Image (cartoon, rainbow, N blue to C red):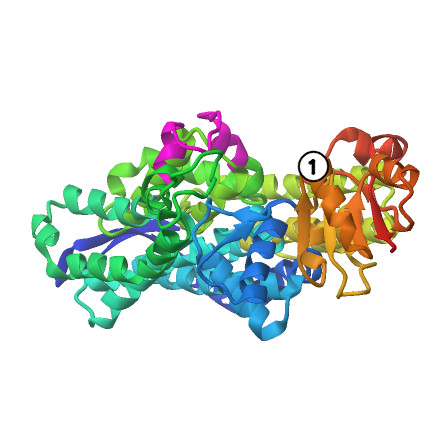
């Protein structure tokens, strides 16, 4: 394989580094692309039917649930009070889905999954446009089964929406640059606005930063006065007016509301400054610590099974950066700027990195097609084989120590998958690399979604308690222990009780339900309340796993008990 340049005669700025693949390799990628894509999408689907995970996913679902129950599309309510953290767009999407499909976990996750599917399409279009179809196919296949992308389709937050909106805005901006029809201006502005209404104003850096780098490097100063870009920004501002209106009505019109422990909080100021730049400079209401290396080591596990190839690709393109020209600078610029922004921020969470996965996939796929040293490709393929065996070993060890139900079937499926792909007569090195990467993804997906997560989710005690709420007319409250999954899966709303006085007042409405701790239940029983213990679900915070929980011998020692009480007249 070799590398060639491609330039448009009518646009000298459109000149890019392009991999040249052999006809045989191109044919193999084209032939097996639909099969791999279908398998990859299937591997992402089982999580749609699993319960929503606490805390963030279940919290966001309850906010969307409140929108539907009260038909209030302006005010976001979470934790029983006005909620000011994320913008409205993901909650609006989930609420629309609830309207159509009912309030349930599948309906919450489905729109995010559909956005993710659209993101695969936009990834293909962008890479095909800038490079060629072989690179586009490979980038899509890599992105489809990147680990944290798959996890984001199960534990849904804002990232599936944000990622696709950024990709869509980038795609239509490419057409604006090349003088296409005005509809692309509208669509670019619309998707950019949706991205902003998903995560905040920093999205402008992730979408437009690479464009600034590209235009400055190529000295296309006339583009800065091109009316199309300014029209796009104007339309973007118009499209975010529903968000600004909602924030103004909920917060700016009500300075008496207590938000972040103080009054006089402006929702619009939070949206434009505190939500993003306040976190970045650590002077806003939501603070963190920050670690420059956090997203480096996060990427190493989050982008599995491709992180090793990604590291090699980054090294390759950094050492050959003088060959990167034209519109590919936009993608690389957006990637570097966003990664630096995340790394320098004081508030960091692993799922933030997901929005860069399409770009990582472009780098990785482009690198694999650019390798002109067959020995290097063979080494990468052997690395993928070693990774597959390592994943197999980790899964089998976890099955041994956790002793989850039906673990023997999980072990059998894992061994069978690895055996099949290791003895399969795949001669092409690149194809073998992809096969072993997908096998590793399949082992992880089957283990997590068919066995491990169903086992973990039973320790979301709120969800277990919600199954016993038969009488939908009675009030439900939580005291001394609150659960977002209880709030979401309950037929109606769940009241959060903060003190003994509030509890006593709530109990005057007997009969009622109360989700609480055994200590509180004993106290109520001694106080003379007539009640029935409907269930005693075990509780553990499953998003922060510890060895004491994983090991079946010590698991009971770290579990806590919750109780759902039916308090009678």
Q: Which residue is mark 1?
A: 499
Q: Is residue 289 magenta?
A: yes
Span highlighted in magenta in the image: 276-299
- Image quarter where the C terminus lies is bottom right
Say whether residue 53 is visible. Answer: no
- Give the mark count: 1
x, y percentage for residue 171? 32, 61
State the residue at coordinates (17%, 47%). Answer: 215
x, y percentage for residue 208? 27, 48
x, y percentage for residue 430? 52, 52
Say whether residue 504 is visible. Answer: yes
Q: Is residue 496 magenta?
A: no
Q: On the picture, is 441 further left or further right than 558?
A: left
Residue 334 position by quadrant: top left
Q: On the picture, is 126 further left or further right than 147?
A: left
Please name whichever residue, 8 or 246, is drawn nearer the observer in this view of the structure.
246
Mark 1 element type:
loop
State the residue at coordinates (43%, 42%). Answer: 373
State the residue at coordinates (17%, 61%). Answer: 231
x, y percentage for residue 79? 59, 46
Q: Is residue 315 above or below residue 143?
A: above
Please name whichever residue, 374 or 17, is drawn nearer the observer in this view of the structure.
17
Residue 281 position by quadrant: top left
Q: Is residue 288 above or below residue 88?
A: above
Q: On the picture, is 569 further left or further right than 489?
A: right
Residue density around tag 1, few if under 14, some if 14–19, many if 20 or more, within 10 Å: few
Residue 339 position by quadrant: top left
Taking the view exactly as shown, the residue that stands out farthest to the bottom is 100
Please name whichever residue, 262 or 110, is drawn nearer the observer in this view of the structure.
262
């Amino acid at each position: 394989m070799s590398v060639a340049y491609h330039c448009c005669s009518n646009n000298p700025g459109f000149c890019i580094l392009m991999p040249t693949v052999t006809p045989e390799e191109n044919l193999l990628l084209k032939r097996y692309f639909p099969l791999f894509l279908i398998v990859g999408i299937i591997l992402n689907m089982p999580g749609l039917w699993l319960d929503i995970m606490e805390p963030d996913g279940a919290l966001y679902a309850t906010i969307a649930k409140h929108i539907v129950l009260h038909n209030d599309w302006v005010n976001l309510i979470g934790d029983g009070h006005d909620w000011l953290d994320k913008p409205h767009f993901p909650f609006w999407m989930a609420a629309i889905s609830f309207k159509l499909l009912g309030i349930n976990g599948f309906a919450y996750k489905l729109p995010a999954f559909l956005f993710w599917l659209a993101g695969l399409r936009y990834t293909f279009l962008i890479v095909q446009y800038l490079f060629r179809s072989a690179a586009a196919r490979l980038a899509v296949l890599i992105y489809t089964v990147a680990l944290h992308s798959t996890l984001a389709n199960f534990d849904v937050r804002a990232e599936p929406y944000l990622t696709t909106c950024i990709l869509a805005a980038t795609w239509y901006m490419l057409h604006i640059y090349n003088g296409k029809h005005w509809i692309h201006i509208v669509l670019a502005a619309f998707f950019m606005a949706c991205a902003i209404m998903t995560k905040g104003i920093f999205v402008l850096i992730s979408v437009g930063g690479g464009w600034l780098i590209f235009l400055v490097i190529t000295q296309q100063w006339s583009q800065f006065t091109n009316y199309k870009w300014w029209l796009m920004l104007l339309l973007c501002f118009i499209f975010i007016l529903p968000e600004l209106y909602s924030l103004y009505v909920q917060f700016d019109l009500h300075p008496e509301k207590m938000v972040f422990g103080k009054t006089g909080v402006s929702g619009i100021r939070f949206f434009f400054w505190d939500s993003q730049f306040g976190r970045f400079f650590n002077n806003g209401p939501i603070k963190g610590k920050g670690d420059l290396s956090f997203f480096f080591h996060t990427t190493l596990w989050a982008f599995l099974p491709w992180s090793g190839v990604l590291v090699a690709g980054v090294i390759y393109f950094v050492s050959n950066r003088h060959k990167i020209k034209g519109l590919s600078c936009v993608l690389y610029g957006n990637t570097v700027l966003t990664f630096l922004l995340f790394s320098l921020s004081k508030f960091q969470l692993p799922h933030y990195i997901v929005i860069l996965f399409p770009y990582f996939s472009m780098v990785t796929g482009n690198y694999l097609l650019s390798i002109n040293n067959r020995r290097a490709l063979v080494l990468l393929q052997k690395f993928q084989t070693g990774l597959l065996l390592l994943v197999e070993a980790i899964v089998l060890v976890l099955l041994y120590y956790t002793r989850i139900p039906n673990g023997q079937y999980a072990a059998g499926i894992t061994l069978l998958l690895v055996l099949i792909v290791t003895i399969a007569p795949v001669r092409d090195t690149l194809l073998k690399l992809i096969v072993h990467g997908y096998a590793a993804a399949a082992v992880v997906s089957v283990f997590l979604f068919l066995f491990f997560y169903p086992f973990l989710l039973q320790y979301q005690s709120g969800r277990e308690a919600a199954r016993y709420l038969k009488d939908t007319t009675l009030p439900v409250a939580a005291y001394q222990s609150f659960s977002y999954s209880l709030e979401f899966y309950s037929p109606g709303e769940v009241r959060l009780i903060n003190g003994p006085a509030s509890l006593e007042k709530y109990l005057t409405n007997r009969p009622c339900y109360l989700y609480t701790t055994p200590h509180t239940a004993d106290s109520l029983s001694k106080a003379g309340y007539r009640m029935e213990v409907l269930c005693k679900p075990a509780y553990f915070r499953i998003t922060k796993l510890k060895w004491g929980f994983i090991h079946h011998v010590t698991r009971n020692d770290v579990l806590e008990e919750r109780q759902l009480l039916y308090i009678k007249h």
